[in-house]
Image (spheres, rainbow, N blue to C red):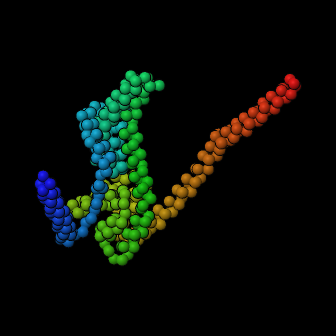
Amino acid sequence: MDALIITCLFLFLLVFAIFLKETYRYSVEKEKLIAHVHEIAGNKAYHVRKRETTSQKWTKRILAYSDDYSALGSRINFFSESHEVEEWLLKAGRPLDLTVVRFQGAKIFLALVGIIVGTVFFVLGFPFAHFGLIIWPMLGYFLPILLLKNKARERQNQLRYDLPEFLDTVSVTLQAGVSLDQSLREVIQFFEGPLREEFSRFNQELDLGVPREKAYEQLLRRNDNPEFQMLIKALIQGMRLGVPIAVTFKIQSENMRRIRKELIKEKAAKASPKVTLITTFVVAPTAIMLIGGLMVLNIMEEASLFSNLFSK
C-alpha cells in the first residue's frame, strides 16, 4: 500500500512538472508571437479595454437579467429618455458594456428588486417598513440614473485634469519632428483613464479608414468637457487652415492651465460662504447651547446648595 501511494505521488509530481514546463513554454511562444505581429503590423498598443474585476463580472452577469425588461423600460422612461441615456453612456465611456436597451431594463429590474426588498422588510415588521414599500422601488429605479450621470461627470472631470500634461508631452514630441498620429500613439501609453481611451479609439478609427475630421467630430460627440472641445475644435481649424499642430498644442496647454487656475480660485471663493454658513448655523448655535447648558447646570447646582443650607 505504501509503495502504491509513493508511486502515485511520484507520478503526480512528474505530471505537475511537465505541466509547469509546458505552461512556461506556451507563455514564451505567445510573447514571441505578439512581438512578431507588432513588428510586422506596427506597435499599436491601444489597450482600450481594461481587465475586469470580479465585482464588475458579477455586476454584468446580474445586469444580463435586465434584458427581459428592456421593452417595458423603454416605455417607462421618466427622467431617462433614450437619447439622453445614449449621451450619458457616451460621456461615461460605456461602463460595464451597457447599452441603452440594457440600461432601460436595469431600471425596471432594480425597481422590482426594490419591491421585493420593501415587501420582505414589511413582512418582518421593520420600523417604518410601510414607507419602504414606496421608497425602495423608487430608489431602485433612480439609482442607475444617478450612478450613470455621476460616472459621466467624474470621467469628464478626469479628462480635464489630465489634459494639460498630455498636451505638453505631445507638443514636445511634435517639435522633435514626429507626426501627430505617431506622437499620439507613443504618448498615450504613459497615461491612464479616459484620455487614453479616447485617443486610442481615435487612432483606431483612423486606422480603419475613418476620415480625420469625422474622427474629430466623434471625439466632440463623446465628450462635453469645454477644455477638451476647445482643443479638438482648434485641431479641426488648424487642419483646415494649415496651422502647425505643435503650436496649437502648446497654446491650448497654456490656456487650459490658466483656466484650471481660474477654476481653483472660483472653487475657493465659493467655499468661503459655505464655511460661513456652517459656522453661523451649526457651530455657533452648538457652542451657545453648550455654554448655556453649563451655566444652567451651575445655577441649578448652586441653587440646590443654597436650599440645603437654608433647610438646615
Nearest the viewer among 248 and 119 is: 119
Nearest the viewer among 1 and 50 is: 1
Left or right for 128, reference 101? right
Which residue is at the far bottom?
176
Q: Residue at x 32, y 69 (%)?
A: 186
Q: Residue at x 44, y 64 (%)?
A: 164
Above or below, comparing residue 250 to residue 118 in the picture: below
> For residue 206, what is the image quadrant?
bottom left
> For residue 286, what is the image quadrant?
top right
Above or below, comparing residue 75 to residue 91 in the picture: above
Nearest the viewer among 21 and 210 is: 21
Picture coordinates of residue 243, whole percent (x, y): 37, 70
Q: Residue at x 42, y 27 (%)?
A: 132
Nearest the viewer among 190 and 299 is: 299
Left or right for 37, reference 173? left
Left or right for 247, reference 21? right
Picture coordinates of residue 280, whole percent (x, y): 66, 42
Picture coordinates of residue 181, whole percent (x, y): 29, 68
